[in-house]
Structure formats: C-alpha cells, structure tokens
Image: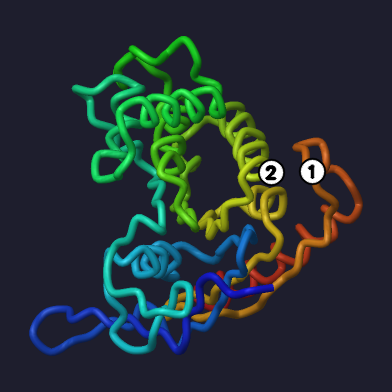
C-alpha cells in the first residue's frame, strides 16, 4: 500500500514561562496508506490533536518531519481537508453557501460548483436544507455540513479531530454510520482522532495508541473486521476482543500517568 502520510521522529516542545519547557510529543512515528482509515487514540493530553494540526500544516513540529505524498508538509494544502470538533461554519451563510465556500479558490465554474455542492448535500443527507442557516440546524446537521465542506473539493486526505465528540450518543452513532457510508463511497484517506475506543474500531483499518504525555506511539493495532461495517458489529466476539486489547493499552497509560 502506498504511503499517503508519514511522520518521522516528531517532537513537539512548548516553552512555558522564561526557562521551562513542556514536551508534548516525543519521537512519534506513524504512517497512513492511500485510501486507508486510521485512528489515533490515547489518554487526554497525549498530543493527538497537536499531531493532527501539524499534519494539517496548521502547526509546526519542533523536530522531525511529516511528509504528505512524499513531500514535506510546510503549511495548509487543499490536498488535506480538516474537520474540527467545533462546527466552524459561517453563521451568515446557508448550508449550500457554507459548502460552496470551500470551492472559492477552485477553477470550477459556477455550474460545476453548484453540481458538486448538490452532490455532497445529498451524500450527507441534507437535501431540503440547502437554504437553512447554521442556527437553524442541530449539532449533528452542522457537522454534516462541515464534513461536506471538507470533502467537496475532493482532497486526497481528510484529517478529523474528534468530529463527533460534542454530540449526544444517539446522534454520534448516526454520524458514525454516515461517515462509514461516505468513506465506502469515496475511499478518501482518513486520519481520525478520537477518545472513543468503539468508534475507532468501528471506523478504522488500523488504530495507533499513544502513550501519556509526552506522547509517542505505544502500539499499532490492525482491525481485521469485515467491511462494510455497521454499529451492530460492536457486539461481535472479534470486536469485543479488539476492544479489550485497546482498553488494556489505554488503562496502562492512565495508571502509569497517575
């Protein structure tokens, strides 16, 4: 499998005060293959989101290198879409306009832009809400808009920072099922940050487990569950076995950090 994203010996150090430093990430190495869905989990504060921001080009590593498509990441790129935990929608734009905003710098004509926006509105189940504004939408619907906006310009990779973390349990399940359907349709490469072990297993081909801060990769777990996946799969013996494996890995980090 061809590597899409590769991190080599990543360190992230923050200066605190005049003379003190905090090491957030220590010697982290990972890779994400083309068309692969990979999750990153670990204890709170271990540097998951920090690394994701560096992979997006929104932050810089203190040492090491992140490569995308074989070239160093040196800033944001239209080749990498980002979905945040907060909805980051423009309140003065309606659903269609929020999604079309991502195409402003494209070379697509207005007819093609409208066609592309309509395609992704349908894909995320928002047909009929094209003219609604963010304050008229539920949390789950706002996140659907954010996902459509990140996908509409067809990036090679999607970086997702706990995108369902603020949703209630029922809406979260619906969004997980939606993401599975979208991924099966487009097979966009995904790096997904989450605290939720079940979510990581349900969505991913592989899961990286990080240590407590300073965060590095503790373990890599391959998720050999058949696709397409469904929420009902979470009661299968194979799923429960993987869940226990990941839970034990996380628990050992929480205990050692305490």
Image coords of residue 123 (percent x, y): 56, 28
Foreground: 121 or 176?
121
Figure label count: 2
| Secondary element at tag 2 | helix
19 displayed left or right of 244: left
Q: Residues within 10 Å of mark 2 (few under 14, many from 20)?
A: few
Image coords of residue 96 (percent x, y): 35, 22
Which residue is rendered at x = 85% and y = 43% of the image? 235
Image coords of residue 220 (percent x, y): 67, 75
Q: Which mark is residue 84?
A: none
| Secondary element at tag 1 | loop
Q: Which residue is mark 2?
A: 184
Q: Residues within 10 Å of mark 1 (few under 14, many from 20)?
A: few
Q: Establish if 79 lies above or below 187.
A: below
Q: Residue furthest left?
A: 18
Which residue is rendered at x = 71% and y = 60% of the image? 205
Q: Are marks 2 and 1 in contact (CB under 8 Å)?
A: yes
- State the quadrant of the N terminus: bottom right
Q: Which residue is mark 1?
A: 228
Looking at the rendered image, the disc whose residue lies closer to the viewer, 2 or 1, is 2
Q: Quadrant of residue 148?
A: top left
Which residue is rendered at x = 53% and y = 56% of the image? 192
Q: Quadrant of residue 209?
A: bottom right
Which residue is rendered at x = 41% and y = 58% of the image? 80
Foreground: 194 or 191?
191
């Amino acid at each position: 499998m061809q590597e899409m994203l590769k991190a080599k010996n990543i360190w992230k150090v923050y200066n605190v005060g005049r003379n003190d430093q905090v090491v957030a990430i220590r010697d982290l190495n990972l890779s994400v293959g083309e068309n692969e869905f990979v999750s990153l989990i670990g204890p709170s504060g271990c540097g998951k989101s920090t690394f994701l921001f560096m992979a997006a080009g929104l932050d810089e590593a203190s040492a090491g290198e992140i490569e995308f498509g074989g070239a160093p990441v040196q800033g944001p790129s239209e080749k990498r879409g980002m979905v945040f935990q907060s909805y980051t929608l423009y309140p003065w734009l309606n659903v269609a306009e929020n999604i079309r905003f991502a195409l402003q710098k494209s070379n697509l004509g207005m007819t093609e832009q409208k066609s592309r926006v309509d395609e992704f509105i349908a894909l995320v189940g928002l047909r009929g809400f094209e003219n609604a504004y963010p304050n008229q939408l539920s949390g789950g619907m706002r996140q659907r808009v954010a996902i459509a906006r990140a996908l509409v310009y067809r990036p090679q990779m999607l970086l997702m920072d706990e995108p369902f973390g603020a949703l209630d349990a029922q809406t979260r399940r619906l969004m997980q099922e939606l993401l599975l359907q979208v991924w099966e349709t487009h097979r966009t490469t995904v790096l997904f940050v989450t605290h939720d072990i079940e979510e990581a297993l349900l969505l991913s081909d592989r899961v990286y487990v990080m240590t407590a801060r300073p965060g590095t990769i503790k373990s890599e777990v391959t998720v050999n569950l058949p696709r397409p996946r469904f929420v009902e799969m979470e009661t299968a013996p194979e799923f429960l076995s993987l869940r226990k494996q990941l839970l034990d890995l996380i628990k050992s980090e929480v205990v050692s950090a305490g």
